[in-house]
Image: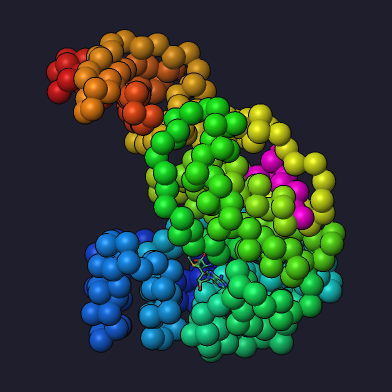
Amino acid sequence: MADNLKDQMKSFFTDFGIIFDKDQEYLDRLLRHQMRNACRKIDHMHAKVDEGQAEFRSNWAWTPTARASNVLISFWADAFLRGSHEVYSAIKPLLKPGVRIADMGCFTGALAAWLATNHPECKVFGIDGNPKAIEFARELTNLPNASFVQWDYAGDTAAPIEACDILVSTLGIEFCVDDDFSWKCSLDTKKLRESEFCRRRTAEVLPYFTRWREACKPDGQLLAVLRVKNIDHDLSIVEAAHRAGWTFDTARSALLLIGGRLFRLMRFAARESQQPSDAEIMASWQNQNVPPQAGQFFDFVLAVVVYESLADKCVLVSDDRRIQDGHAERVSVGIAGDIGFIFERSTTGYAELKLISLSQVNALLRSGIAA
Ligand SMILES: C[S@@+](CC[C@H](N)C(=O)[O-])C[C@H]1O[C@@H](n2cnc3c(N)ncnc32)[C@H](O)[C@@H]1O
């Protein structure tokens, strides 16, 4: 029996059908094999997504069996495990007899199954808009305290379940509003808030938080793991949540860096209260608990935030370059304690930070940074 919680969850999810520690190529072959005819449709779908004619979210409706759906999750098994573990660790102290929990966007119901299995004293609802997902979740989990319910929680229909004490969601919002890369490196939250992207993202997210608020008791909580790229995602999500009657708990929210990708664990209380200020939201990024390690890569505003937070920074060499459309870029190589960095910042608004080992810094200095 695995001894720590994350290992226990991994072993439970493995038994459930989610595959860990396999490369994308292996999973791709497996998914294609399991999907056979549907694969051609998926390729077609991807082409349409690439051409901007379709939304990726539709892919969720295409997996024909519970098994194939679990293979689909396996493509981000690490993010699923980490997100589920973070969410579960946060709500565990609240799980008392009679507590009602809903997992928003449960897909095949793995997290809901974990919760229902380990907390027979609680009632667990797995919610998903995809009827196939609900069918598969019911096929995979048959427990008296677990129910799976189809509901489009960004649509017009009221919640089909009694209000819950706790809502959880791991990647239950599939953002469709395109990213706008202007202002990305700005730490000016006022400008970020006023951007077209923020306005459109807030409007996109508002229906989710409105419906979720209706599905939650007035003293309930929401724990959501969302894929974010930048601070303007936070600002728009927090704004939408506030309008829907949630209060963002900055102190108990965190940035999660999983496989080089950035996610946000966001905690909200279902009561109206003063929202944290922009400065507090910004500080929650600046105080992010991502320990610097060689191999990490950050871009846009996070690159700036992490760069500024590096202690004992010393730029050893820098190079100014002209890039496209009259813009300029500065590339700096240096060290910060026992880690090296390459920091690029351009007048286009782009920034990126690569953390490297000290021996890589030496090699770069020998070969010249332009190389
Ligand atoms: C990226 S998957 C995440 C699945 C799982 N929670 C995980 O962490 O891997 C998103 C899930 O949310 C569901 N979903 C997205 N938008 C929804 C909506 N408006 N109403 C209900 N379900 C939705 C999708 O059907 C899909 O199953």
Residue 32 falls in which quadrant of the image? Answer: bottom left
Residue 275 falls in which quadrant of the image? Answer: top right
> Quick check: is 246 in the magenta stretch?
yes
Work out whether residue 40 or residue 210 is closer to the camera in this orientation and state it. Answer: 210
What percent of the width, then of the height, locates residue 193? 58, 38
Residue 116 falls in which quadrant of the image? Answer: bottom right
Is the residue 293 above or below the residue 364 in the image?
A: below
Is the residue 107 above or below the residue 337 in the image?
A: below
In the rendered image, which quarter contains the N terminus? bottom right
What percent of the width, then of the height, locates residue 93? 77, 57
What percent of the width, then of the height, locates residue 18? 44, 71
Is the residue 289 above or below the residue 139 in the image?
A: above
Look at the image and name its color scheme.
rainbow
Residue at left offset 36%, top offset 12%: 315
What percent of the width, then of the height, locates residue 34? 30, 83
Work out whether residue 206 or residue 301 is closer to the camera in this orientation and state it. Answer: 206
In the rendered image, which quarter contains the C terminus? top left
Residue at left offset 54%, top offset 35%: 192
Residue 260 appears in the rendering: yes
Q: Is residue 354 left or right of residue 1?
A: left
> Quick check: is 52 in the magenta stretch?
no
Residue at left offset 32%, top offset 66%: 53
Work out whether residue 191 or residue 38 is closer to the camera in this orientation and state it. Answer: 191
Residue 87 appears in the rendering: no
Residue at left offset 68%, top offset 53%: 241
Give, as a single range, the part of the protein colored magenta: 245-253
Q: Is residue 27 left or right of residue 110?
A: left
Query: How many labels sit on residues?
Result: 0
Is the residue 102 above or below the residue 51 in the image?
A: below
